[in-house]
Image: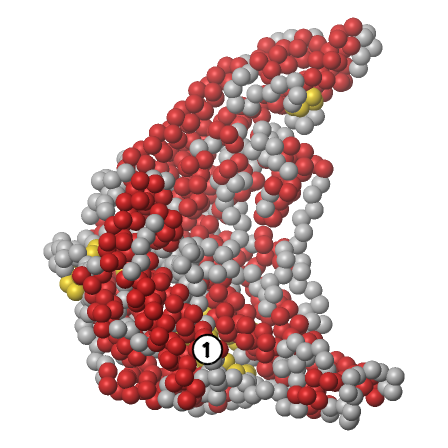
Amino acid sequence: MRSTGSSAFGQTLQFITSTKLQELEKQRLSYQEHAKVLQKADACGDNLIEKVELLLEAIQSWPGSGSVDDRDSVSGKLNLANLRMWLPQAKQDPNFDRDILRSWIDTLEAHIRHSLMRFDGAKLFGSLFNEWIASGDSSIVLPGSSGDKNGANEGSEKAGRQEMHDQLTRLNSIIFEDADVDTEALESYLHDLFSTQEATKALHPLREQTKELEDSLKRETFNTSKVENIVRGVLASDLMDEDKRKTLNEILSNPIVLEELASVLTMRMASLDTWSWPAEGITIEMRRHLSGKYRAFTDPDIIDALLLHHIGISWQVKLKASFRRFLESKAWTRPRPVENFKNISQQLPDRCSIDEVRRQQQRESFLNQLSSSKRFSKQPVYDENGMDNEQSPVAVKQKLLQIMATEALLNTTLHGSYAVVRSDLEWFGPSLPHQSILTVLKFFGVSKEWSSFFQRFLRTPLRFKGDPSGQVRTRIRGTPISYPLSSVCGEVILFVMDFAVNQKANGLFLYRLHDDLWLWDADPEKCVAGWKEMNVYADLVGLKFNASKTGSTCVGPTKPAGLPEGDIRWGFLYFDSSKTRFVIDQKQVDEHIVELRRQLAATKSVFGWVNAYNKYMAFFVRNFGGRPAPCFGTAHLTDIISTLARIKQELLPNVQGGAVAYLRSVVETRFGIKDLPQGYFYLPISRGGLELRHPMIEMFALKQSFNNEDVQSFEALAKQDKSRYNDLKDYWNDPTSIFPGKEGPFITLDEYLSLRESWLCEWKLRYEYMMTVKELAFVHKTPVVESYLSQAKTKYTWGDLDWYEQWLVSLYGEEVVKRFGSWEAVDASLIPVGMVQLFRSSRMKLDQ
């Protein structure tokens, strides 16, 4: 299915926006004439009553944007109905205070001037949006923009940085060359690994459930609700180009098309054994991301995308449930149970432990790239634009860092040692050997018929976008990006690695986010055993570890032989074993400051500049670990704040005043608007501002909550254990204390201390505290700030604002209101809402 309505959609959106902006301009010009009443008022001289009447009539007679009536108050000070009631007194009372008249005049004149400024703001807003649409700075396609495929950008794929061409060459050398995999050796390894009685027992239902899924899929029928769910799932991925994404959005609002799609997908599923990719091949495009990496995305036909998405999600849900049952089975090695359980449970009846939290963390981490439900949920994408979603890949990685940092502090306190290994697999998706995937799938019960389907999916005919030869070549290695089936292939391979580490390293858990791999333990030798088995398995399935992202460290003892060389790194962080915490790598920051300068310089519009700035600043914060939990320590939070300050300073070294000063200068140069207040640039687009994000605000607010760090440490808790033990022992020995079946002496101090991770609630609570990101400092409202909100044409209350805007209006509200008369630079009802949402959801078009 080709996108036929996208151009019409874009034209309609642009027409609506253009109409709104034209109407705004008409009203602006009309109000300029209307505001000449200010000159007439000046001509009234000392006749203050006449001035008031003239100004009042002008304000109440204006019918357009910003109109007011008798129920309204002007500038939050003067109710117009009251003013009309007071005017007779002012006219006839010879002793009426003229200062009151002057105050009325000042208020009425200020309202007219503020209205003029808001109309100027509306003109600026329209000019900024028109500039943005025409610039092609974001991945939107509107007719006539430089992002229009029929426009001047055609053929630009031949351009691009050298690193893109290097990565493209490397990709070609991988996906079109077969891997040397000894499938017999791999099969032998699998049979040996799962040969225990408990593993064999757990495998049987897993294979039965696989067969059930295969049978049910072939018989499946589709309805409109199911198709709508699938479309939303595809839209949440990075799979489709902008034209097809717009087509999918149009499909969601067309019940007839949804019904037709349901019929087509039902037929396609019934004849799945004949499904194949189109012979002319699938276009593959290299896209650059904020990290600087390029990834190869395919652009399938819409029907194929929907079909493959549904099949992939179905396999994800079934395999995740099956593998989770395997995780909970007796085949999985777990920590030994507490000795002397009966006696301890009598003496310490309140049990809650760190081990319980660990088990929950491991369940959440386990196969987290696979969906748990067929209902639409956001699939992992490579763009990494969002931080708010707790289930996003970035949020899950940040949680993993918090666990690792907390474990480092805990184990060095309790055991005096801690080892950690981190790695990932080199070119994991593109290099996955098809023989390995099919061998492992067969081991877990996938039939020949479905193995044939998986093989057809994997052997994709590809043609590279911009390749003048148009050559079609068949992929013989690796999986395509952003397909749920690709995640199935990768996770099935890595599940075996999970189990192998567990079996060969005495119950060690391999924490993973796809191919981002972490091992840690108080016993370095367990990490040695786990890392050794990971290498054995990787060699068998034809994978390699990425040397540049592989490393290990030990806190306490000397690092043993058998652990990999290199630092523990994630994002812009590396783990400093001497400080037992993560530290920001300033050299990496320097490299990305240079890159951000380049991307900003490549933008052609103010909104494009702001979009790039906001996304890169969020990218920096994410790669500093996001909002730090107490396990990172106050020092890390201080480092984040100082590094962000340095970025802002060095990004525009020749501009005094940073991003705001630069944008103020650009707006004045291009559009002739001078002296805009600082708050205008941070003001949300929905209020008529530029929505420039301030990356440091949340960190400042968070720092207010980082108190008593030493008191809340594991070391401080350990010092309290002996005293707490003595209290419990005394209570046990007290003849008046009541314990059912009380007998024998209280446990020894050593026994008590050995329960810190497996029983004692105080340690569990402290463990959870160390990983909990604190609430941002409370922003207190004031009557003045509430008046700023009430003066807006669209009435806001304090509770309507999110935390970030509460901070903004409290800090910058006064200057914004002084310039525009309210916490709105433009009447919100006249802002093109469709374009606002388009701006917020658009993908930044990176300079390739």
Q: Is residue 323 left or right of residue 722?
A: left
Residue 575 in the image: x percent, y percent?
51, 74
Q: In the picture, residue 11 is in which quadrant?
A: top left
Please tell me which residue is depicted at 65% across the width and 18% down the height of the picture.
70
On the question of residue 557 being in view, the answer is yes
Which residue was labeled with disc 1? Answer: 327
657, 433: nearer the viewer:
433
Please tell me which residue is depicted at 48% across the width and 65% down the height of the picture.
396
Q: In the picture, residue 456 is in which quadrant?
A: bottom left
Please tell me which residue is depicted at 66% across the width and 72% down the height of the picture.
765
Please tell me which residue is depicted at 59% across the width and 46% down the height of the picture.
802
Query: In this rendering, is residue 170 above or below 703?
Result: below
194, 84: nearer the viewer:
194
Label 1: state its secondary structure. helix
196, 26: nearer the viewer:
196
Q: In the picture, residue 315 is in which quadrant?
A: bottom left
Residue 278 in the image: x percent, y percent?
17, 56
Residue 818 in the image: x percent, y percent?
62, 31
- Quarter holding the C terminus is bottom left
Direction bottom: furthest residue: 744
Q: Is residue 647 left or right of residue 92?
A: left
Q: How is the image coloured?
A: secondary structure
752, 554: nearer the viewer:
752
Amino acid residing under circle 1: Leu
On the question of residue 285 being in view, the answer is no
Direction top: furthest residue: 92
Binning the other alpha carbons within 10 Å of mark 1 as few (below 14), some (14 to 19) or many (20 upward) gives some
Q: Is residue 328 left or right of residue 350?
A: left
Query: In this rendering, is residue 732 above or below 163?
Result: below
Residue 533 in the image: x percent, y percent?
38, 86
Q: How many marks?
A: 1
